[in-house]
Image (cartoon, grey):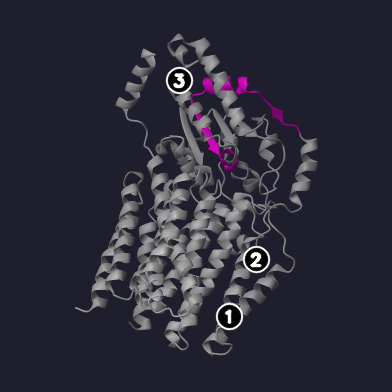
């Protein structure tokens, strides 16, 4: 790919990101940041490719650390986001509230 | 079809999954599925990379992945919700660090490369190193390893300029193929120091901006490295993250009404004003109150607004606050939570904290909505927040936070501020709210105060209505 083509892809993706993410409400800003955090763990792909052409020992050490960092970024990022989102609940539904009142009364 | 085509088709699927995942992040009900779509996208991208046939040295790859997984999984599972801001900073930092290391290794490996690959690689290395070391300092500050107060670095602007210049100069040397492999080491070292000098002087109250900005940096470094590698997955994913980080940075800056440059200039708070506030506080009068008295006020209110801040996170008072809200709701009191965008240490921090305590997200209102309902609010409980309710932002043009949108609690019938002492807040700015005749202070640790309030409320309600006596 030529550089201009890559710049086109970069700019278009930036616009897509801007419009998609502009719609996320304040409530979800932390999970959003955490999920996008995990997405930039895509650098692990770069690590995998460059490892294929590495020659020296130091290069390999650097790349193993880089791949470990990338994995930490991806795995940690998605898991933490999932944990956070698992906690977000809407107002308890009327039936739930009724059930709770009933339980309370039974005690 | 070549293997490269197959690789790119995998990337196409991955990109679609990333974007669909992000679209689903816009609503709490679909967000969780969105996160897993994005994770699936990541798996597809990795699979596509293996399909390219470029991946070799499999044992080393497995070693790297295993180390990352062994460190990451328990950390992500075990981290307390109160420690979330530093965790986000840490995960962000290692992403940037990975870019810097990969660029370094590739530079060492190949003696000569075309300019249109080398230039983006050098840019990626610079931004990646800044993001890594900046994030580590942010992590240190949030974790309490490094002081959260702004650290004064003498001649900081000059130092930063020299470091930035040094990094660019080393980049120039690398391009001119002078200095060999050391040019890259110099570039990384200068960028690393620049990242440290950038974040160290910024106070804890400005952390939501810093974390968003570093997030954008890491995304951009991944995108730049994608150009260097001719890898479309890196370019698109990096650009998506760069856009998201930029949006959040802008939103946070707007919520403080301070331009990004002034925030990055650092040193906000802890300067002069703190001492003046202390002197002033001695002369003016404030009223302190007791949990029993507050219990009566909230129990007979029609509407109660709770304004949480970082102090609530520090005291881990979110569960006690939920219990308080639940008791009041059972009494038919309307309960809402007023959330300021920059309350806490990262964007949306308070939302996550309250969600952990089972507070339904539709009880959380943003500051405009909170202000619109303020005149019909009987009682406001300010728990561990300070600057976001400071009327000086509206009234005092000399105040460092003048112009920042606040939750204007002075329009409510009464306000109770739960606070440790009269000491000024994190930003070190005096808060005239405390001396407002409608405001009372409930001193003590936020968790203990709220728990005491819950106990008093139960005693009160137990005595008042037999129907709820089981609550006691």
Give the extent of the magenta segment. B285-313
The answer for how far apart the CA atoms under marks 3 and 2 are is: 53 Å
Q: Choose the circle earlier in sequence order: 3 or 1.
A: 1
Q: Which residue is mark 1?
A: B168
Neighbor class of circle 1 (other Cα within 10 Å; few <14, some 14-19, many 20+) is some
Q: Quadrant of residue A91?
A: top left
Judge by depth and name the residue closer to the eye, B43 or B352.
Answer: B43
Residue A40 visible, this orientation:
no
Q: Chain of mark 2?
A: B
Callout 3 secondary element:
loop
Same chain? Circles 3 and 1: yes
Contact flag, marks 3 and 1 (Cβ < 8 Å): no
Q: Chain of mark 3?
A: B
Q: How many marks?
A: 3
Q: Which mark is residue B331?
A: 3
Neighbor class of circle 2 (other Cα within 10 Å; few <14, some 14-19, many 20+) is many
Callout 1 secondary element:
helix
């Amino acid at each position: 790919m030529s550089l201009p083509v890559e710049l086109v892809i970069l700019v278009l993706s930036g616009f897509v990101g801007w419009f998609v993410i502009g719609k996320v409400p304040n409530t979800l800003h932390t999970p959003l940041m955490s999920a996008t955090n995990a997405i930039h763990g895509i650098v692990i792909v770069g690590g995998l490719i460059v490892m294929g052409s590495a020659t020296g020992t130091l290069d390999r050490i650097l790349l193993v650390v880089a791949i470990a960092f990338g994995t930490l970024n991806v795995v940690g990022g998605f898991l933490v986001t999932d944990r956070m989102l698992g906690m977000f609940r809407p107002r308890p539904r009327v039936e739930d509230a009724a059930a709770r009142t009933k339980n309370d009364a039974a005690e | 079809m070549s293997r490269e085509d197959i690789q790119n088709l995998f990337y196409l699927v991955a990109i679609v999954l990333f974007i669909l995942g992000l679209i689903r992040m816009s609503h709490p009900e679909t967000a969780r599925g969105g996160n897993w779509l994005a994770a699936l996208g990541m798996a597809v991208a990795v699979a596509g990379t293996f399909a390219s046939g470029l991946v070799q040295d499999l044992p080393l790859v497995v070693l790297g992945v295993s180390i990352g997984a062994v460190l990451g999984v328990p950390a992500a599972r075990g981290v307390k919700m109160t420690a979330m801001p530093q965790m986000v900073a840490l995960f962000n930092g290692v992403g940037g660090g990975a870019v810097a290391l990969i660029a370094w290794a590739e530079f060492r490996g190949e003696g000569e490369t075309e300019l249109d690959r080398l230039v983006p690689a050098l840019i990626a290395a610079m931004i990646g190193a800044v993001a890594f070391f900046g994030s580590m300092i942010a992590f240190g500050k949030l974790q309490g390893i490094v002081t959260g107060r702004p650290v004064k670095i003498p001649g900081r602007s000059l130092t930063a300029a020299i470091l930035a210049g040094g990094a660019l100069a080393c980049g120039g040397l690398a391009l001119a193929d002078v200095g060999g492999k050391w040019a890259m080491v110099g570039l990384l070292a200068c960028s690393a120091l620049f990242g440290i000098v950038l974040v160290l002087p910024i106070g804890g109250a400005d952390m939501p901006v810093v974390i968003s900005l570093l997030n954008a940096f890491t995304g951009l470094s991944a995108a730049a490295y994608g150009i260097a590698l001719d890898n479309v997955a890196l370019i698109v994913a990096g650009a998506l993250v760069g856009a998201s980080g930029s949006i959040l940075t802008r939103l946070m800056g707007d919520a403080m009404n301070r331009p990004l440059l002034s925030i990055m200039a650092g040193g906000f708070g802890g300067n002069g004003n703190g001492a003046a506030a202390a002197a002033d506080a001695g002369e003016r009068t404030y009223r302190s109150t007791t949990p029993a008295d507050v219990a009566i006020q909230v129990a007979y209110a029609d509407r109660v607004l709770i304004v949480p801040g970082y102090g609530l996170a520090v005291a881990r008072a979110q569960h006690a606050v939920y219990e308080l809200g639940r008791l009041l709701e059972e009494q038919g009191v309307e309960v809402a939570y007023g959330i300021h965008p920059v309350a806490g240490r990262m964007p949306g921090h308070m939302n996550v904290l309250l969600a952990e305590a089972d507070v339904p997200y539709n009880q959380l209102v943003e500051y405009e909505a909170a202000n619109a309902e303020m005149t019909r609010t009987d009682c406001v409980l300010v728990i561990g927040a300070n600057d976001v309710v400071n009327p000086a932002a509206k009234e005092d043009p000399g105040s460092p936070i003048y112009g920042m949108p606040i939750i204007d609690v002075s329009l409510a019938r009464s306000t109770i501020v739960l606070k440790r002492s009269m000491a000024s807040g994190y930003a070190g700015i005096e808060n005239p709210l405390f001396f407002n005749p409608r405001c009372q202070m409930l001193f003590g640790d936020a968790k203990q105060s709220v728990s005491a309030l819950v106990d008093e409320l139960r005693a009160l309600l137990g005595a008042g209505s037999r129907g709820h006596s089981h609550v006691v």
